[in-house]
Image (cartoon, rainbow, N blue to C red):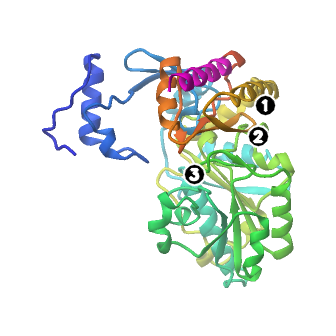
Amino acid sequence: MGGPGRQIMLGPMREDTRRWIEADKRHAWHPFTPQGPWTADDHEPLVIVRGEGPWIWDSEGRRYLDGNSSIWTNIHGHAHPAINRAIVEQLGQIAHSSFLGFANPRASELASRLTGLFPPGTLERVFFSDDGSTAIEVAMKMSLQYRMQTGEPERTRFVAFADGYHGDTMGAAALGGVSRFFERFRRFGPDVGFVRSLAGLDQFAASEINAVVIEPLIQGVNEMRPWPAGMLAELRDWCDCHGVLLILDEVMTGFGRTGTMFACQREDVIPDFLCLAKGLGGGYLPIAATLTTAPVYDAFLGDPVNAFYYGHSFTANPLACAAALASLDLFLTERTLEELPAKVEHLAKLLEELASCEGVVDVRQCGLVAGIELRAGLGSPVCLRARDHGLLTRPIRDTVVLMPPLCVEREDLDLAIDALKAALAGV
């Protein structure tokens, strides 16, 4: 596989690009990436150096539409002046301070803003962490401790949905339904049962279930597969009927992706725990939040032994909170949600055209999220060829993900679909 002295053969390119790639291949380890093909002599990875709006540039000066929002994180576009300004202003005050035993203005403001996005008396408390996995981890540990402190310690089982994905920390990985990623670690995690539909819930003793975890409206890593309309509301009713907590993983679906600020709002569902990350910081800095209710919070009061002893060094980082606040402001000043329906409708028409192309098996859409399922073996080649036509994205198996920043214009969506058509024709 090559040690420090391995010779890396690359074609003509700028000297700085060559240097960065050589250093990467010798020393970096990439997530979800088989390192053998990555470090092969004939592999020339893109080095991303700049972004503006929905566009990004590589180190060779080539421009691409950011077709998956830089792994589903970017909301209002790259290098947005308002978010840049908020981060710089905060940087002039303090970059980080501990949230363990101290408060900071931006975290206070952000917690208030997030809870204010829901009806009064519902999601009233915010626990900050670092990323989607830890937001889920917080909900899992918090819900288990809640049961211990409210007289139901026997409720330890989680129920998740087959082919779902909820993160990579050990607890979150136990909820994962993708065997390739999680099977080898499953026995180290908590007790989790898996179902494919609401009907499957009845196979478990409800009195033993702590919580049900689901990605609302659409599963992301499961090749962008939407749930049937009304399913989320039915799940909320089932949980209420059986005293089961509901954990919603809106790490991918939150902040406008599905057409509303949060996917659960499409079916007027309020969970017991709402997990947020990715778009929370606008795609600029890592930050996550787990929102929960007053009854859950109250169970941790009283005796100090009841406290939630969990947290991270960079919890509620002021720079990340400033970016998140600026992102929330932009939803108002740029009328982001109001502009979405026309874009969603335009994308639907384009996908309908794409569905008739040779090699396309199915197209699936939820808001400004789309999965284009291709014939077996076409996913990666099509994404690679689409780069030549100005689109940068990646597949999940053979399903091409199209999830651009919400600031994307209709002509940008035209470019994306034209790039996929051209790539399909070329492959």
Amino acid on which the number 1 mark rests in the picture: Leu
> Looking at the image, which is closer to me, 5 or 244?
5
- How far apart are the two marked residues, 1 and 3, measured between alpha carbons? 23 Å
Which residue was labeled with disc 2? 261
> Looking at the image, which is closer to me, 5 or 120?
5
Residue positioned 53% across, 58% down in the render: 100
111 shown above or below 294:
above
Quarter where residue 324 is shown:
top right
Provide the secondary structure element on which disc 1 rests. helix
Residue positioned 37% across, 17% down in the render: 60
| Position in image of residue 295 (x %, y %) | 78, 68
Residue positioned 64% across, 62% down in the render: 162
Q: Residues within 10 Å of mark 1 (few under 14, many from 20)?
A: some
247 shown above or below 61:
below
Magenta region, main secondary structure: helix
191 shown above or below 351:
below
Amino acid on which the number 3 mark rests in the picture: Gly
Q: Can residue 419 be found in the magenta stretch?
A: yes
Which region shows up in magenta? 412-427
N-terminal label among 1 and 3: 3
Q: Which mark is residue 337?
A: 1
> Looking at the image, which is closer to me, 376 or 272?
376
Amino acid on which the number 2 mark rests in the picture: Met
> Looking at the image, which is closer to me, 85 or 278?
278
Which residue was labeled with disc 3? 132
